[in-house]
Every structure is written in structure tokens, then in C-alpha cells.
Amino acid sequence: MWLTISAGNLPTGQPIETEVPAELAPRLARYLAEIRPRFPGAAAHRALWAGRKGRGLGGAAVYGAIAARTRAAFGRAVGPHLFRDCAATTIAVARPGRVGVARDLLGHASLATTNAHYNQARSIEASRLHAEVLAACRAAAKTLGDE
């Protein structure tokens, strides 16, 4: 199953076409076949998320729904942009040499935007390394103190 998001629906102005992850495909297929058609006017538009007023949900409505759902689940509202940030940073940490993968996933027109996530990932790795060095120094100091 593939998902296509037109350029006009994205802040980057770049269209995205992506395969839906295997774990999500059956759920999305069920939504499209059984749930979405129940919304008034759903057949009159191609928006993925149908609204109660006979139109597809716009960006602000999708943002609000995600923020409300994450607030209920985690006690803090999280917007869609943070999910994108997390995806790019995770790729940067797991596969530092694959900056193009994150760019393609996020639909960035240029690597400069994606590189900001890679800089964040490098900061995370530097913090982890610093913590390891401090722990080793503490362990060495403790050992010297025992002598």
C-alpha cells in the first residue's frame, strides 16, 4: 500500500510518495474501507482524513487531533513536526552516513534542512560519549582511592 501526499498539502512544497509500513497497512486499509466512508461527503474528496462537515481535515485540524491524542496518551501535546524530527534524528543516530534517507523520508528539498537533524544527532552522541568518559573517570578515581 502506498500513500501519496501532494505538494500543496505539505509545508516543503515537495510531494511525498511512500510505502505504508507493513504494520500499519491493514489498519489504514480498514479505515479507508469501513470508517472513512461513514463520514458525510467522504466520497466527494480525496483527503485521507475525512471530517464531520463533509470536507477533508485541513492541516490545523490534523495538528489539533494529533496534539489532543498525544496529550491524552502522554500527558503532553506533541505535534506532527516532532514526529518528523524524531524520525530524522533516529536515522542520523542509527545510520550516520545515510543523510539522504532522512531527506527522502521527510521530503526536504535540500540537504541543509536535514543536516540540522544530523547536527542534533551528533550532539546526542557527543553527550553520550561525554557521560561515558565521566563514568570512566569516576571509576578510575574510585579505584585509586581504594589503593
Image (spheres, helix red, strand yellow):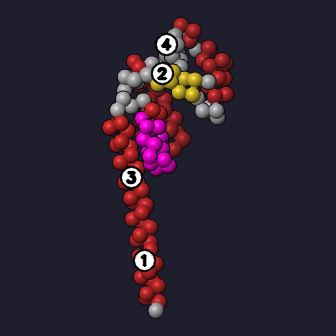
Question: In whole angstroms, how far apart are the C-alphas of marks 3 and 2?
Answer: 30 Å
Q: Can residue 49 be seen in this view?
A: no
Element on which disc 1 rests: helix
Q: Which residue is drawn at 44% across and 48% down?
A: 96
Is any part of residue 43 visible from this angle? yes
Which quadrant of the view contains residue 8? top left
For the residues labelled 1 and 2, say whether their Cβ atoms are less than 8 Å apart: no
Q: Are marks 3 and 2 in contact (CB under 8 Å)?
A: no
How far apart are the two marked residues, 1 and 4, measured between alpha carbons?
Answer: 61 Å
Magenta segment includes 80: no
Disc marking residue 55 = 4
Which residue corresponds to the image point at 32% horizontal and 37% vertical from the top-left? 112
Real-space Cα separation, disc 4 to disc 2, in angstroms: 17 Å
Callout 2: 10 Å neighbours few (<14), some, many (20+)?
some
Residue at numbered disc 1: 138
* Amino acid bearing label 4: Arg
Furthest-top residue in view?
44
Residue named by callout 2: 5
Report the front residue among 15 and 51.
Answer: 15
Mark in the foreground, 1 or 4: 1
Neighbours of disc 3 within 10 Å: few (<14), some (14-19), many (20+): some
| Amino acid at the residue labelled 2 | Ile
Q: Which residue bears the numbered disc 3?
A: 122
Image location of residue 43, percent across then percent down: 57, 9
Q: In which quarter of the image is the N terminus?
A: top right
Label 4 to label 3, Cα distance in Å? Answer: 43 Å
In three-dimensional space, the C-alpha distance between marks 3 and 1, rounded to whole angstroms, equals 24 Å
Residue contact between numbered discs 3 and 1, judged by CB atoms under 8 Å: no
Q: What secondary structure is marked by label 4?
A: loop
Question: For the magenta stretch, what is the residue range?
Answer: 86-103
